[in-house]
Amino acid sequence: EIVLTQSPATLSLSPGERATLSCRASQSVSTYLAWYQQKPGQAPRLLIYDASNRATGIPARFSGSGSGTDFTLTISSLEPEDFAVYYCQQRSNWPPITFGQGTRLEIK
Amino acid sequence: EVQLVESGGGLVKPGGSLRLSCAASGFTFSSYSMNWVRQAPGKGLEWVSSISTSSSYIYYADSVKGRFTISRDNAKNSLYLQMNSLRAEDTAVYYCARDRTGSSGYYPNWGQGTLVTVSS
């Protein structure tokens, strides 16, 4: 099973700042990695798939990069609605599909 | 518009059974693999099970293998999860999720979730 480790666990930033979230895989997942955003009481929302492709309707301030074992989600300029929990997910070697433990992005 | 609506959650005693349903609309249900993902209270996301378009391929997480059964009825645009021998650690919100394309392994569409609580 591929383990995804996200860092940091919590990131405290202010609106307008740049956010950089990391996801490291226990073995190569090529570019078969996605990022999701989840707000309290809501279902997750797909942001990025195949490491760098934005899902339908996702603003351009969200971007993904990486391949192999190291991946990054960047939010170029934080909007108030971006404060949420973010999960990475791999589909390279499944089953099982696996998720990271999440990074909480909070307002500083 | 893609809509996924789960139902069937509730309170059940350890060892009991529950059947979850997911009603799909707004897309050609038979063309997409479907999935269940759960989230324990205050915890992260855990993939539970996936089923291919014609039910030919079915996969389970080790944590539920032998206890849960995923199925679908393409004529009724519905996905199901039969959960037997439930344990306290199965307590979670259960989401049904549609694959992005066919069987991509990425989930752009989710239901609102249904809460399953296993407790005596």
Image (cartoon, coloured by chain):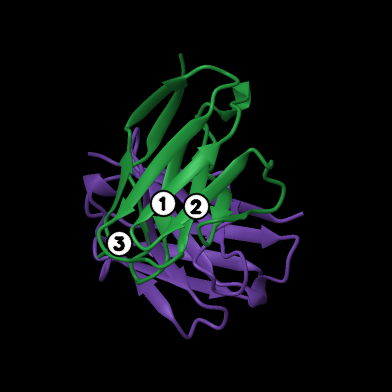
Would you name the residue on which mark 2 appears? Answer: A65
Disc number placed over residue B84 in the picture, else none: 3
List the single residue furthest toward the top: A108
- In the foreground, B20 or A67: A67
N-term-proximal mark, 1 vs 2: 2
- In the foreground, B98 or A85: A85
- In the foreground, B79 or A107: A107
Crowd tier of the residue under label 2, counting other residues whose Cα lies within 10 Å: few below 14, some 14–19, many 20 or above: some
Q: In x, y percent, where is residue B43?
A: 33, 38
- Dot 1 and dot 2 residues touching (CB under 8 Å): yes
Q: In x, y percent, where is residue B13?
A: 26, 46
User: Do the residues marked 1 and 2 share a common chain?
Assistant: yes
* Chain letter, disc 1 residue: A
Would you name the residue on which mark 1 appears? Answer: A71
- In the foreground, A95 or B66: A95
Q: Secondary structure at mark 3?
A: loop
Name the residue type under label 3: Asn
Crowd tier of the residue under label 3, counting other residues whose Cα lies within 10 Å: few below 14, some 14–19, many 20 or above: some
Residue at 26% of width from left, 56% of height from top? A3
Residue B68 position by quadrant: bottom left
